[in-house]
Amino acid sequence: MLFLEAPNEIILQVSKYQSPPDLCSLLRANRRLANLLGDALLDCALHSISETERYAEGALYSAVIRGDERAAKRLIDGGIFKRLDEKKLLTRILSDHERRWGEKALPTLLACGCDPETRDSEGRTLLALAATNGLFEAVELLMDRDDVDVNSTDTGNNTPLHMAVEVGDYEVVQLLMDDERVDVNRPNNNNRTPLHIAVMMGHDEVVRLLLEHSEININSKDKLGWTPLSYPADAMNPTGYLASVQLLLNDKRIDVNLGNKHRRTPLHTAVTMGHEAVVRLLLGRDDLDVNVRDSIGWTPLSCAAGSANTTGRPTVLQLLLNDHRVDINTKDKRGGTPLHLAVRMGHEAAVRLLLDCSDININVKDISDKTPLAYASGEYETIVQLLMNYLRV
């Protein structure tokens, strides 16, 4: 008797002793065997001793990707997750953003009872993974479920919104923010909110989107006391952040004078870094305190005169001196003025600019009873000459 002429019962009995590859070959032989041996192949994938995990995983992937809920449920009910790690499988399919298996497989897996709150080794839920990898449909599917925590946090206390913001996925960020359950101001372990992250990453359109939210805290501080506005001021290259700076400054809720733990404001930081464009934008604010002092009594002008960073300093110093609100003789906690600081650092260009100011006090003494000339003597002969020439005028 030919095998294909055998009764179904005989064929099914024989199939129990075949390997998954052999059964696949039989299924491809003709339509009758394809209809007859489908479930047998699933059972074989579950119980085959040889390369069990690979066959079981392949069978499950095949079922869920084509949306075959019956086949997937048969595998799950048959104990496939005794052979496979459910947690690893679920988190991996949503990390596989190149082939987009996750969006195809997730609906079937969830319909078959898989846990939507499954987490990976970093504590990221399926929603967080979908948000990180820009899987819009997967995010939408999970957001529609009542048993999904939209504010779940990973080991760094980052929410799905933090993660979508970090990668700059505008559509996913918007989808998350449209849900009233999402906390737009939730801080992570560094006390950084999604707005902090968006500004740090230079995602201007995401910054704009976040600022449109009525409950966004534009002045929130991280662990170092930095507000979102502080980050562009400290950037090595602020050019890519100017749009975000302008967006923040255009918002009526912004407080431009908030300082960090050392009471340094964004203006202090931008001046210290020599960021001319950021300084210009900040000086354009009527509510800016240009003479605000940090924890050691330095004003932004002190930073421009006494900073060890020379890049852009003469330019930002001139910008400050051109502002009528700036007090050029302000003293720090040691009684030093900006002129003292410029002299002590040997910044000849800064000394020249300060001496060009008509109201500069060249004879002021600090707590050590020293004038700027006293500090220059024996150290910087050119600066000594500049100061002496000023005194002769």
Image (tube, rainbow, N blue to C red):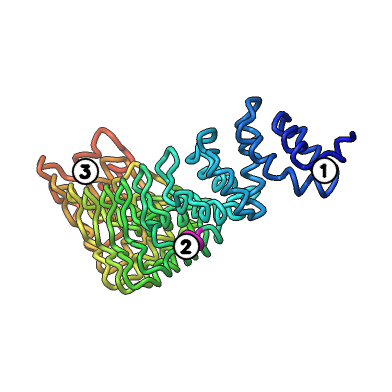
Q: Is residue 329 above or below residue 86?
A: below
Image quadrant assignment for residue 207: bottom left
Q: Looking at the picture, which amino acid does disc 1 mark?
A: Arg
* Residue drawn at point x = 17 percent, y = 50 percent: 297
Residue linked to disc 2: 173
Indicate which label's residue lies in the foreground, 3 or 1: 1
Whether the residues at callouts 2 and 1 have beta carbons within 8 Å, the answer is no
CA–CA distance between discs 2 and 3? 58 Å
* Residue drawn at point x = 80 percent, y = 44 percent: 33
Point out residue 68 in the picture as x, y percentages from the top left corner: 64, 53
Q: Left or right: 171 with respect to 319?
A: right
Magenta region:
139-144
Find numbered disc 1 in the image and state the secondary structure of the residue it sits on. Answer: loop
Name the main secondary structure of what is drawn in magenta: helix
Image quadrant assignment for residue 41: top right
Indicate which label's residue lies in the foreground, 2 or 1: 1
Q: Looking at the picture, which amino acid does disc 3 mark?
A: Leu
Q: Left or right: 305 with respect to 42?
A: left
Find numbered disc 2 in the image and state the secondary structure of the residue it sits on. Answer: helix
Residue linked to disc 1: 28
Relative depth, front residue between 37 and 3: 3
